[in-house]
Amino acid sequence: MSQTFSQDEIKKIATLAKLKLTSEEETKYAAQLSGVLDFFSQLQEVDTQSVAETSQVTGLENVMQEDVVENESPEKMNLLLNCSSHPIEDNSIKIPKIM
Amino acid sequence: MNPTSLSLFELSKKLGQKEISSRELTDSYIKNIEAREGDINAFITKTFDLAREMADASDSRRAAGKTYSNLDGIPLTVKDLVCTEGIQTTGGSQILKGFVPPYDATVWGNLKKAGAVLLGKTNCDQFGMGSSTENSGYGNTKNPLDLKCVPGGSSGGSAAAIAADFCAGSVGTDTGGSVRQPAHFCGITGLKVSYGRVSRYGVTAYASSLDTIGPMGKTAQDCAMLLQVMAGHDDRDSTTPNIEVPDYLNELEKDLPGFTIGIPEEYLGEGISQSTLQALESTKAVFKDLGVTFKTISLPHTKYAVPAYYIIAPCEVSANMARYDGIRFGNTQEGANYEEIIVNTRTHGFGDEVKRRILLGTYALSAGYYDAYYRKAQKVRTLICQDFTQAFEGVDAILAPTAPTAAFEIGKNTADPLQMYLEDILTIPASLAGITGITFPVGQSQEGLPIGMQLLGPAFKEERVLRMAHQFQTAIDT
């Protein structure tokens, strides 16, 4: 799986990640990430054919809670809304149209 | 004697005996901070007015005989990843500059309810991504013991603040070593808790399957006192098992006969400095005098921990960082349309290392690569977990260096991310396994910089590693 990054690939990933890179950054990240990917290739020597994946370590399963709305006070609502730098209208954040 | 050089435990006693007031103590720390913070840069936000208010309130409670806990009136700092109601919380990143959370993280809420005083929010690598605090969006922190050196990271501001007598203790976070390595670099004690022991609610997420919040202090006893208040199940964090929180201070006093400590041979390989190996030997000698037996063990998948971690963590980063869109909170940039607002905000707000990890994670999770990277790394993680499970069948704890060397110089690894990632080689395996570990100072390098060893214990056995470190610290103190 040894892989090297081209500048085009970095550009594509950056677009997916909603980042804008300068061409110097593209060159730098392409070189650095190629080195890191090369380093990752050593994992291929580990036989994991009959090994299960670990996605969490607590052993907890299906942790549920009642689906109840906790009404915050209007003051708290305002504080939350005021964390945004966009205009607030009818307890909502107003952003430029998406569609 | 300047009270700020005392341990949290001793200060708690002095407050209890009314030999000192919380206000006097708080003012003493503020004096230290004002004298040296210009050189060290341990803080992103200082909260001195609030601290004095909280200290006065604590003194009034004490005068009325109504203290909340043995932490009442104790001045602390908190890593700036932890949300503090009404106080700027930046995550160490410019993307959250000016963000004032309207609520407390559970861990800080618990400490506040216990009467602790907040001196400020400490500097760190952005969202915890780094091993030197050089990735902070607010300037790097310097090691108070040698200003040419890094304090470690990512909880470098917290470790530096304790080493510089800026506070009695601090709250750090450890995802791949971010409590233990700075504790080692700054000559203090830091506890990485088991995954799920302390609630992560209200703490900015880095890699959600690995993030832990841990106490940092001068001694294991100090960490035990802090953990007592920090630990436990939280309905707001579904990864906190409902496991009883023991009386940590009580547990510390039990001695260690019959204990067996394992030394993993894989942790003593290439690159480990001579003074680190010597410090390990002298640490073993102290434990032997305390009745502990040693045996060599093997954790065969150790060398795969760094590549596995640097796949899993960036994958989780790429998902967690998606929330920073400049819409609901944080330092928003302007744009001609919705898309541009998001792109400009992220491009301007995230630092270099955050971008690198987002790119890496986005790539590894993208179509065609998921199996080769993320799934493979998660399988290797299983093998690393099994290494520890098997080891703990034969030993009570594992002793090893925290990092290959003492603190390195500022700028040494900044041009080479892979070299920086390899700094975490000895702390990452325990993070992947979700177990607990404590780093405590045991010696010095040839340059006179501190060396800390880590003692690793099974998950949810914090009382065991705290007790062992405490017994060690008591033995070398007498």
Image (cartoon, rainbow, N blue to C red):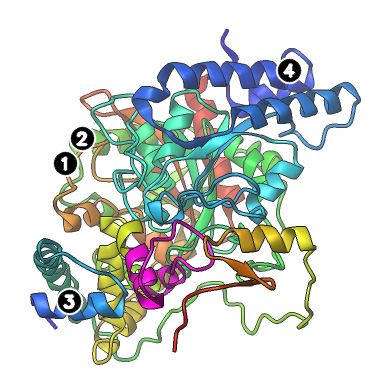
Amino acid residing under circle 4: Ser
State which chain disc 1 sits on. B
Is B235 placed above or below B445 here? Answer: below
The percent position of residue B98, horizontal first and vertical second, equals: 50, 49
**Residue B405 magenta:** no
Query: Extreme right residue here?
Result: B64
Position of residue B249 in the picture relative to residue B293 (left or right): right
Q: In the rendered image, which residue does mark 4 sit on? A: B21
Query: Upstream in the sequence, badge 2 or badge 4?
Result: 4
Near mark 1 (Cα within 10 A), the count class, few <14, some 14-19 or many ≥20, is few
Q: CA distance from mark 4 to mark 3?
A: 58 Å
User: Residue B385 occupies which quadrant of the picture?
Assistant: bottom left
Amino acid residing under circle 2: Glu
Amino acid residing under circle 3: Lys
Name the residue rendered at 66%, 39% in the picture: B225
Res B461 visible: yes
Q: Dividing the image into 4 quarters, which one contains the N terminus of chain A?
A: bottom left
Q: Are marks 1 and 2 in contact (CB under 8 Å)?
A: yes
Both on one chain, marks 4 and 3? no
Q: In the rendered image, which residue does mark 1 sit on? A: B412
Foreground mark, 4 or 3, reads 3
For numbered disc 2, what is the local secondary structure? Answer: loop
State which chain disc 3 sits on. A
For numbered disc 1, what is the local secondary structure? Answer: loop
Near mark 3 (Cα within 10 A), the count class, few <14, some 14-19 or many ≥20, is many
Q: CA distance from mark 2 to mark 4?
A: 39 Å
